[in-house]
Image (tube, rainbow, N blue to C red):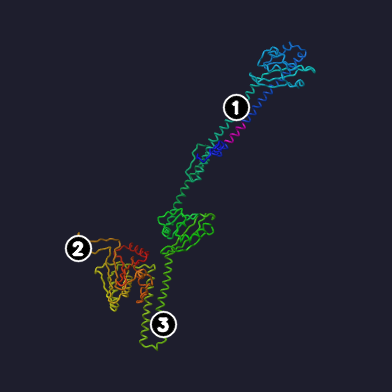
Amino acid sequence: MSAGTAPLNWQQRLARWWAEFSLQTKLLAAATLVVSLVMAGICFFALNGIQADVRMSDTRFARDLGLLLSANVTPLVAEGNDRELAAVAERFWKSSRSLRYIFFADPDGVIYLGIPISGSSGSSSELLLSRRLELPADLARRPQNPLIRQHLSPDGQVTDVFVPLVAGDRYLGVLALGINPNEAALASAALSREVTVAVFISIWVLVILGAVFNALTITQPVKELLRGVRSIASGDFEARIALPVGGELGELLEGFNDMASQLEAYNEANIEELTAAQVKQQSLIATMADGALLLDAEGRVVLVNPTARRLFRWEGRKLEGALVGDELPEVLALELQTPLETLLSGERDSSDVRCSFGEPARTLRIVLQSVRDVSGESLKGIAVTVQDLTREVELNAAQSRFISNVSHELRTPLFNIKSYVETLHDLGDQLSEEDRKEFLAIANAETDRLTRLVNDVLDLSRLESDRSWSMEPVELRPAMEQTLRNYRLNAQDKGVELSLEVDEQLPRVRGNWDLLLQVFDNLVGNGLKFTASGGRLMLRAYPWPDTCLIDPSTEASGDSPTCALTAPLPRLRVEIADTGSGISREDQQRIFERFYRVENAVHTEVGTGLGLSIVRGILEKHGTQVRMASELGVGTTFWFDLPLEQADDSELQLEVERASRSPELI
């Protein structure tokens, strides 16, 4: 008991003790108490009746006996014949075993004769009530209604009868008799009393035995059944009742056990189904490409899939039970505060929010949907779906830029062609032969430029489609030699040296001849364009770093160079290097974007701006990526790795998929 708690009084303790019993026990105790009280009342009234009957019997006997004696002695008292009176009284006293004493008193109440002692003898006796009787004044007027009373003496109960002696109109005194109770009546009363008490005790014992029997045969099974029902209700389907009870109660308990067994089997089946469904659901949520969150009715996090953790930078954090607004970035929390409150309050069932956050900026579409019960009344939670639209936004922007750039690139040569053709058409007679040739040459060049642009756009479109390209063993040296032959005249006119550094025994690669030829053409043409006179453009190819070619005739020794295959996909590295003007770091970040041209900044060369985008797309089809190193005023080197002929097809396909998903690399 603590210091601040007051001690309980007996009433509170009794109330607490009584409250600990079950309702059934209280009712049983109350019924037992009522039956006990009723039986006690019946026994009390029965005993009182028996006692009243005994007293009535004694009273009647005493009255009759007193009237009989008074009738015999009244004449003697009237004559004053005391001797005869004493003799009659003595005979009468001896003839009745019920008499305790006989007294005669004069009208003043003074006792003058008494049996077994005389009132004048002077001797004392415990049976002598008084020397003088104090009697009611009206006793002389009712000789037929003697005064009867009872008193308790040391020898037991005594009935006193006071009979007035009246002769004519003369009051002679009083006859007093002391009468013992009727032994037969007493015996009968005692027997009745004992029988009544025995019956009461028997009935009370039967009630107690009945309550005990009820507790053992009915109450106990009912309690066990109630305990079993509560166990079933709490989800414990293994609860069983084992009591040796027959009859209807036994059938009831057996039925309960059968029901529990069926519920247990049904529960196990449901648990297996629910577990399987939960595993499927969790697997589905975990593998969703979109982020998914599940909130409870208070906005606290219940479930988060890995995609959402990655989007919100929640890796390794315990989020279950936390308010989602406290865990989101501040910008997103502010954006979602109002929509989330409207869903939690029940004003709306769904909401769609699009917002951007982070650096670099990411665009997210967040869809909130209320989750309600079957009736649709109670809100159980909120399902949140997060879609990363960053790539879609970038693609839309790229598409817009592509359309804008294509439109611009197509419009420029078309405008030039139209202008010079219109001039030739309208002013053909007024132009000299040299002007007409110049205009036709410009229109022809613009037509070539337009053709190249259309071809580049078509090439890029084919590369970005789902078309599958056939890959087969390719000799790379002939393709490089053919490219250099195509540009040799242009290089001589510009004063640029072309060189090829390729081993004669270069291993074959897996690739597409036409596509690789286009890669060399674009890279060599691009390098030649930005290399000034006196510069140099080189093509190199060599195994790197996965294989090493050693002359078979050379035996390996401790000091001789050796190498082994270090990867399951051998590679051949190809480099195209020039000593041109180089590319700034800012331009290097965007050099592979469509329609981006370095010449836009220096205004020295023209082009479509699609060449390097086409190169990147072709090399991705070969499972590799183009890389570059450049410095202003020094030159630029592009390089890439191609799989060798013996490369595994499955590994190659995997590399193609990885390359297509990887971010742009410089």
Left or right of 126, for residue 168? right
The span picked out in magenta is: 29-39
- Mark 3 and 2 residues: CB-CB less than 8 Å, in contact? no
**How much space separates mark 1 and mark 2, taking CA atoms?**
129 Å
Which residue is outermost to the right?
169
Going from the N terminus, do you reach mark 1 or mark 3 first? 1
Q: CA distance from mark 1 to mark 3?
A: 140 Å
Please identify, in this view, whether the residue under mark 1 or under mark 3 is nearer the observer.
3
> Residue 616 has which mark?
none
Give SS at disc 3: helix
Tell me, yes or no, if residue 248 can be seen here: no
Closer-to-camera residue (560/603): 603
The residue beneath circle 2 is 554
Residue type indicated by callout 1: Ala
Q: Are marks 1 and 3 in contact (CB under 8 Å)?
A: no
Q: Which mark is residue 419?
A: 3
Asked if labels 2 and 1 touch by Cβ distance under 8 angstroms, the answer is no
Q: Secondary structure at mark 2?
A: loop
Which x, y percent locates residue 649? 32, 63
As drawn, the residue found furthest toward the top would be: 83
Q: Secondary structure at mark 1?
A: helix
Left or right for 639, reference 400 = left
